Image (tube, rainbow, N blue to C red):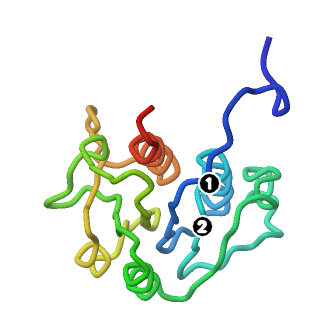
Amino acid sequence: MQATHDSTTFEKKKFPIVLILDGISSPANMGSLFRLADAFGIEKLIFCESPVDLKSNRLKRTARATIKNVLFEEQENSEAVCRELKTEGYKILALEVASGSIPVQESNFQDQEKVALVLGNESRGVKKEILEMADDLLHIEMFGDNSSMNVTHAGAIALFEITKRLQPVQ
């Protein structure tokens, strides 16, 4: 029988992860990112350079009730946000197929290290200036002809790998 929200045995956890959303503009993607943030227990979402319309039916349908549970903020400049988080001790990771990027599953993290993961705009990806300031560039290995995927799918894969590595070994 399918489990309900109240009957799962998942252990609630919070991870020191901030998602920096560099120009994400689709309400459906914004809603999905709220759900991912809740599912992976991340600290907060920072939407940059694109307004979040919480009245959007598409965003609300996709996010479901997670808008109430997930901290988020809106900022004008994604580069400034990355610089600020870097001064606060966050490791800046950009998810983008780029020269020098490594597969996300090969990334290394200290237990509970503070991470800021940058996801880029649906069309243009992560800005060049952010790629240049990032501590690491990560990509997802793909095996078909295409070299990209939907930003929320990529974010889900990356969050799965990162949270797996940030958990203490038992």
Q: How many marks?
A: 2
The residue that mark 1 highlights is 37
For image coordinates 67% across by 57% down, the residue present is: 34
Residue 6 in which image quadrant = top right
Q: Amino acid at mark 1?
A: Ala
Q: Are marks 2 and 1 in contact (CB under 8 Å)?
A: yes
Q: Is residue 99 left or right of residue 93?
A: left
Residue 55 in which image quadrant = bottom right
The residue that mark 2 highlights is 45
Q: Circle 1 sits in a helix, a strand or a loop, which is it? A: helix
For image coordinates 46% across by 83% down, the residue present is: 81
**Residue 28 screen position, x and y as percent:** 66, 56
For image coordinates 27% across by 50% down, the residue present is: 108
Which disc is residue 140 wearing?
none
**Placement of the C terminus among the 4 image quadrants:** top left
Single out the residue that lies furthest toward the left.
100
**Residue 86 screen position, x and y as percent:** 37, 79
Mark 1: few, some, or many residues within 10 Å (few <14, many ≥20)? many
**Placement of the N terminus among the 4 image quadrants:** top right
Q: Is residue 31 left or right of residue 89?
A: right
Mark 2–mark 1 distance (CA, rounded to whole Å):
7 Å
**Residue 3 screen position, x and y as percent:** 79, 21
Q: Is residue 92 above or below residue 51?
A: above
**Residue 63 screen position, x and y as percent:** 74, 53
Q: Is residue 120 above or below residue 129?
A: above
Q: Is residue 54 above or below residue 33?
A: below
Q: Amino acid at mark 2?
A: Leu
Q: Circle 2 sits in a helix, a strand or a loop, which is it? A: strand
For image coordinates 74% across by 73% down, the residue present is: 53
